[in-house]
Image (spheres, grey):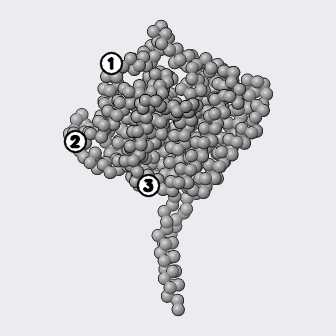
Amino acid sequence: MSVVSSVAPRSGRTTELVLTLDAVAIVGLAYVNLGLATTGSVPPGLAALGLGYLGVALAFHVVLRWRASYADPLILPIVTLLNGLGLVMIHRVDIAEGRDISDGVALRQLMWSTLAVAIAAAVLVVVRDHRLLRRYTFLAGAVGFALLLLPLVPGIGNQQFGARIWIRVGSFSFQPGEIAKLALAVFFAGYLVQTRDALSVAGRKVLGMTFPRARDLLPILIAWLASLGVLVFEKDLGSSLLFFGLFVAMLYVATERVSWIAIGLGLFGAGAYVAYLIFGHVQTRVLLWLHTFSPEALDTSDQLAKGLMGMAAGGMFGTGLGRGRPDLTYLAESDFIIPSFGEELGMIGLFAILVLYALLVERGLRTSLGTRDGFGKLLAAGLSFSLALQCFVVVGGVTRVIPLTGLTAPFLSSGGSSLLANWTLVAILLRISDHARRPLPDPAAGSAVAEARTEVVKLP
């Protein structure tokens, strides 16, 4: 005789609390280490900054206990640690460039971090069920494409470092493409859930792969042309690659056909080659990639060369936090924050950061596998892949695996728009994981309650 009993899974909130406290403690130790290395004393504002950062992290943890009690317990500690390490390195660059904490980039980044966490908490409170987002599939698509095109509007569009991806109103600047990736992920997930059966229909078989029918190629052609439009008009290779790669990855998850990957890679390769032949800024990126230390490349820009030399100076174990010279590289606190970590923490420290990113992506993909609805599966997979692709593009660019693209490392690099978008992305992943991990109602318990109510009704 066997007895089958249901066991309610643990929510994991206590584990999350302990790991979040550990993450804040690591950030605090890094900040103390930086102060001792640069000034020989403990930073005077350690208590205020440490308690403030701890308060922000604990407030988000409380919201999770309240609104998403079964959410993944590892996502918040990982993001807290990444965000905190980014703040420490940005402050380190401020010190190297002679900026005080009151007028440095780190204080502004801390304020953006607080605002980003508040918005992420609001998303968790407002969006009680991720499936509600499916109602706004085409609205999200319209908003996403509008945000991508917003930098082209005369008067507010602003070009920086050769790319027109910013909008500026007075002294306020913002990168709308960061928010566009969230809206487009919602649009792709909702669209592919509706059309994946048609896109999965078999077509001709070539080289062992079954390719889709010609009339089903229209969606990927539209996405390809849109990504080329971003590359041509905004001169932004990074956003173009991220946008097209996100769509192809979600298309593969929806249909499980390798042929879509082959078609996507072929279209991207053809578009990149044509762009190289036509546009000078793409030729410059390729020159810096293939011939970084040549006289022609150094006359154009020595940013990549200095970043590589900084990482080489760090070696295996690094120069030590606060003892390197990351300020010699341009944009060491934003586009090139990965070489800054590589120089002062060495290859071991940089690999530890990459492991944190890998764990974050793994938890997102695990959420996708555990979700019971198709829209949630696609959305979680798309958001996780966008993080993975952005990390690959950033790290690959500064290590000469691929050409530089101008994207920033999620949670590490300075920039308010990136923080807002990525913390919102984390909130959506947590909402989906809460739905995936939450136990289903026990049918037996429901029947018992119904029978009890019936007996009460029958009583005279």
Whole-percent x, y for residue 416 in the image: 56, 35
Amino acid beneath label 2:
Arg
Q: Would you say the residues marked 1 and 2 are in contact, meaning their CB atoms lie under 8 Å apart? A: no
Graded by Cα atoms within 10 Å as few (under 14), some (14 to 19) or many (20 or more), the crowding at tag 1 reads few
Label count reads 3
The kind of secondary structure element at disc 2 is helix
Q: Residue at x 48, y 27 (%)?
A: 158
The kind of secondary structure element at disc 1 is helix
* 101 relative position to 433: left or right: right
Whole-percent x, y for residue 45 in the image: 76, 34
Q: Which residue is mark 2?
A: 215
Q: Which residue is mark 3?
A: 131
Q: Residue at x 51, y 31 (%)?
A: 168
Q: What is the CA distance from the residue labelled 1 to the residue labelled 3?
A: 44 Å
Instruction: Note whether 87 is above or below 18 in the view shown.
Output: above
Amino acid beneath label 3:
Arg
Q: Is residue 88 visible?
A: yes
Q: What is the CA distance from the residue labelled 2 to the residue labelled 3?
A: 29 Å
Graded by Cα atoms within 10 Å as few (under 14), some (14 to 19) or many (20 or more), the crowding at tag 2 reads few
Q: Mark 1 or 2 closer to N-term?
A: 2
Q: Residue at x 30, y 40 (%)?
A: 219
Whole-percent x, y for residue 60 in the image: 62, 49
Amino acid beneath label 1:
Leu
Whole-percent x, y for residue 426 in the image: 53, 44
Q: Mark 2 or 3 closer to N-term?
A: 3
Viewer-side residue, 452 vs 45: 45
Q: Which residue is mark 1?
A: 277
Q: Would you say the residues marked 2 and 3 are in contact, meaning their CB atoms lie under 8 Å apart? A: no
The kind of secondary structure element at disc 3 is helix
Q: Would you say the residues marked 1 and 3 are in contact, meaning their CB atoms lie under 8 Å apart? A: no
Instruction: Note whether 66 is above or below 80 in the view shown.
Output: below
